[in-house]
């Protein structure tokens, strides 16, 4: 990135502000980026704190300047909230810091030099943004899903009731004898099941009576044959 010498003030011996944060703010004057200029206008919460053993950072790339600004204005994520790379000691900054709504959800350490491509916080931030947009576009989405589920349940209940009515009309059919339907799917399902069982019991009685009548008929025929034989003798 080109650095204009005109932005160097008289009090500076060279292009080297006293702190990395001042350097980043000064370098971003050349970036002409609305998001980064917005970050620079936010409340300053802390200075740029480097990891132990590191005394300088490269602030010539614009994303490195953005990372330094976000570090000074963002929210610190400690412990389990920190990204995986920060826990491993990667990145120039001493803490894991994110700035909500900027850097695509990644922390300042991961945005430095790599623009946050490997940050473990980046995906979760994007998912939250996508979910927020979906809820905003369709706030009644969940209610619609509930209504659709209820409609499908009612249709299913009516279908099952129709099947039971057909079964009750054909008492000889035994294919669906053991079918059980939850009472909540249809308000008259218990009554229909009772009618089916009643007709099935009646059919069984009729079948037994038919068998009994046949046996009686056979016995009568045997007696008639015996009487005829007796008369002939």
Image: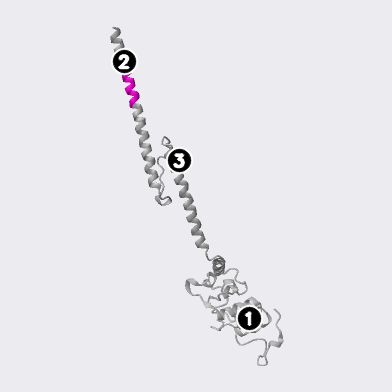
For the question of whether residue 69 can be seen, the reply is: yes
How many residues crowd mark 3 within 10 Å: few (<14), some (14–19), many (20+)?
few
Q: Earlier in the sequence, mark 3 or mark 2?
A: 3
Mark 1 or mark 3, whichever is nearer to me:
3
Mark 2 in CB contact with mark 1 (< 8 angstroms):
no
Against 157, residue 55 (above or below) is below
Q: Tell me where residue 136 appears, x and y as whole percent.
A: 55, 68
> Residue at position x 53%, y 69% from top?
84
Mark 2, secondary structure of its residue: helix
In the picture provided, is 203 more to the left or to the right than 18?
Answer: left
Q: Earlier in the sequence, mark 1 or mark 3?
A: 1
Q: How far is mark 1 from mark 3, CA to CA?
A: 74 Å
The quarter of the displayed image where residue 50 is located: bottom right
> Residue at position x 48%, y 71% from top?
80
Q: Tell me where residue 160 appears, x and y as whole percent.
A: 45, 46
Q: How far is mark 3 from mark 2, CA to CA?
A: 45 Å
* Rendered image coloring scheme: one colour
Q: Nearer the viewer, residue 76 or 135?
A: 135
| Boundaries of the magenta span | 212-220
> Residue at position x 38%, y 38% from top?
199
Residue 154, numbered circle: none
In the picture provided, is 82 more to the left or to the right than 171?
Answer: right
Q: How far is mark 2 from mark 1, CA to CA?
A: 118 Å
In the picture provided, is 18 more to the left or to the right than 202?
Answer: right
Q: Nearer the viewer, residue 87 or 193?
A: 193
Q: Main secondary structure of the magenta part?
A: helix
Question: Can you identify the residue that label 1 sits on?
Answer: 37
Question: Can you identify the residue that label 3 sits on?
Answer: 166
Mark 3, secondary structure of its residue: helix
Question: Can you identify the residue that label 2 sits on?
Answer: 224
For the question of whether residue 56 can be seen, the reply is: no
Residue furthest bottom as drawn = 11
């Amino acid at each position: 990135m080109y650095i204009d010498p005109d932005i160097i003030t008289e009090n500076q011996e060279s292009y080297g502000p006293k702190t990395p944060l001042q350097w980043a703010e000064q370098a971003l004057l050349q970036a002409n980026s609305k998001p980064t200029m917005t970050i620079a206008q936010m409340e300053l919460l802390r200075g740029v704190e480097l990891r132990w053993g590191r005394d300088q950072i490269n602030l010539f790339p614009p994303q490195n300047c953005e990372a330094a600004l976000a570090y000074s204005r963002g929210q610190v994520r400690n412990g389990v909230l920190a990204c995986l790379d920060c826990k491993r000691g990667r990145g120039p900054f001493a803490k894991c810091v994110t700035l909500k709504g900027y850097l695509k959800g990644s922390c300042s350490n991961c945005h430095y030099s790599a623009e946050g491509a490997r940050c473990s916080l980046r995906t979760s931030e994007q998912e939250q943004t996508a979910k927020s947009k979906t809820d905003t576009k369709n706030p009644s989405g969940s209610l619609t899903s509930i209504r659709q589920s209820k409609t499908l349940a009612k249709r299913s209940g009516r279908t099952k009731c129709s099947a039971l009515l057909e079964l009750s009309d054909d008492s000889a059919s035994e294919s669906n004898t053991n079918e059980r339907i939850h009472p909540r799917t249809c308000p008259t399902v218990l009554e229909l099941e009772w009618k089916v069982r009643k007709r099935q019991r009646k059919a069984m009685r009729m079948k037994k009576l038919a068998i009994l009548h046949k046996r009686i008929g056979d016995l009568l025929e045997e007696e008639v044959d015996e009487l005829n034989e007796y008369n002939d003798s």
